[in-house]
Amino acid sequence: MMQGVLTLNSGSSSIKFALYSMEKEPTLICQGEYEGLPGRLHFSAQDTKGSLDDEIIHDKADFETALRHLLDWIKKSYSDVQLTAAGHRIVHGGERYIESVIIDENILKYLETLIPLAPLHQPHNLAAIRVLQILHPTLPQVACFDTAFHHTQPKLATLFALPQHFWDEGIRRFGFHGLSYQYISETLPKLIGEKAKGRIVVAHLGNGASMCALKDLKSIATTMGLTALDGLPMGTRCGSIDPGVLLYLGSAKGYTNQDMTDLLYNKSGLLGLSGQSNDMRELLSLKTPEANEAIDYFCYHIQRELGSLVAALGGVDTFVFTGGIGENASLIRQKVCEGLKWLNIEIDETLNLSPSSKAIQISKAESKSVWVIPTNEEIIIAKDVFKLMKA
């Protein structure tokens, strides 16, 4: 019987999963997704040979429905695999967790206190853990944190200019997308050797978006802060905003905390600017003035944040695009890099348009190095689970 580890990335409307064998090191068996929460569930899965399962699940669409189906499907499809653990992407680990941990009740209770800091993600991350405890109570579960990778940042990079007691209470810049940045930091040395220890900026661009400055393959600065609202504009999140705007909305417009939470997390970003969609693919196809303005705003702020991170690094040697938009939207990469000639960053048009499922360098020969690297948060989770189970 082969030992297997299940990785889960649970959101408000979907659950992404992957199954790995755990003989000597994590090896992918299959991966897939449940879409349609809450509502009619769509299940799809693919193994490494390309075989595909695809079906609509006619049932009440909640986490228990999806995870019960997943456990049954694994048992039926891979009868030679015995699940030995599950690993979860947890967006916020707070000040307490700087590495992955085996979950117990005390850890869960602490993570629940962080829900206000990540309301789009944390409740759903934790819901999957609770459901799996019911469905498979003897299965060890591991929490892998998006904030953990950034614990190497110097204190100055994590401070807010607030009275000191707020720092002591845990109000500080944490940073997110750490599992993605961890993967890039482990992959770059295989691509560029010792140069990977130089000055690297990574842009993780998707419905959630952030950027990170790496030196010696460690995070020294990032664009997100206490919450996943700060920095770049995102699908429905605002990115950086003058806090005076929020004070004005509260005092002059009567906005409650819940009103502002809904505005900043669900109605802003690309959706708010365009008034049409939070999906970059759709905005690129619309070509309306509003869609174009939202796209231009997104690219402009990537350029501005890049300037800030370059200042923190004292220069830049390599620029990396990753995430759904970063990997697939060639026009976004083109627009961003058109404004970076002052950094000696120029991309080759043909290379930039070349579709690739693997890492590809898209810069001109005389330019600083620019790469597109597909991220893989699941393998980082699997490796951490493997390490903890071995220990």
Image (cartoon, rainbow, N blue to C red):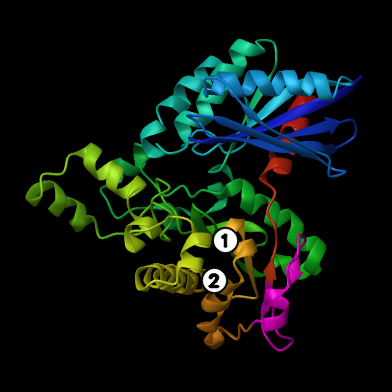
Report whether residue 103 is seen.
Answer: no
Labels 1 and 2 touching (C-beta < 8 A): yes
| Residue neighbourhood size for the residue with mark 2, other residues' Cα within 10 Å, grouped as few (<14), some (14–19), many (≥20) | many
* 93 to 199, vertically: above or below: above
Instruction: Give the percent coordinates (x, y) of residue 374.
Output: 70, 57
| Residue neighbourhood size for the residue with mark 1, other residues' Cα within 10 Å, grouped as few (<14), some (14–19), many (≥20) | many
Element carrying mark 1: helix
Report whether residue 288 is seen.
Answer: yes
Image quarter of the C terminus: top right
Q: Observer-nearest residue: 8 or 15? A: 15
Majority secondary structure in the magenta region? loop
Instruction: Give the percent coordinates (x, y) of residue 244.
Output: 18, 57
Q: Which one is earlier in the sequence, the residue at label 1 or at label 2?
A: 1
Instruction: Give the percent coordinates (x, y) of residue 96.
Output: 50, 33
Q: For the magenta stretch, what is the residue range?
A: 347-370
* Pointer 2 residue: 332
Element carrying mark 2: helix
Residue 354 magenta = yes
Residue 155 magenta = no
* Disc 1 residue type (three-letter): Ile
Image quarter of the N terminus: top right
Res. 184 image quadrant = bottom right
Q: 222 left or right of 352?
A: left
Q: 58 left or right of 365?
A: left
* Pointer 1 residue: 325
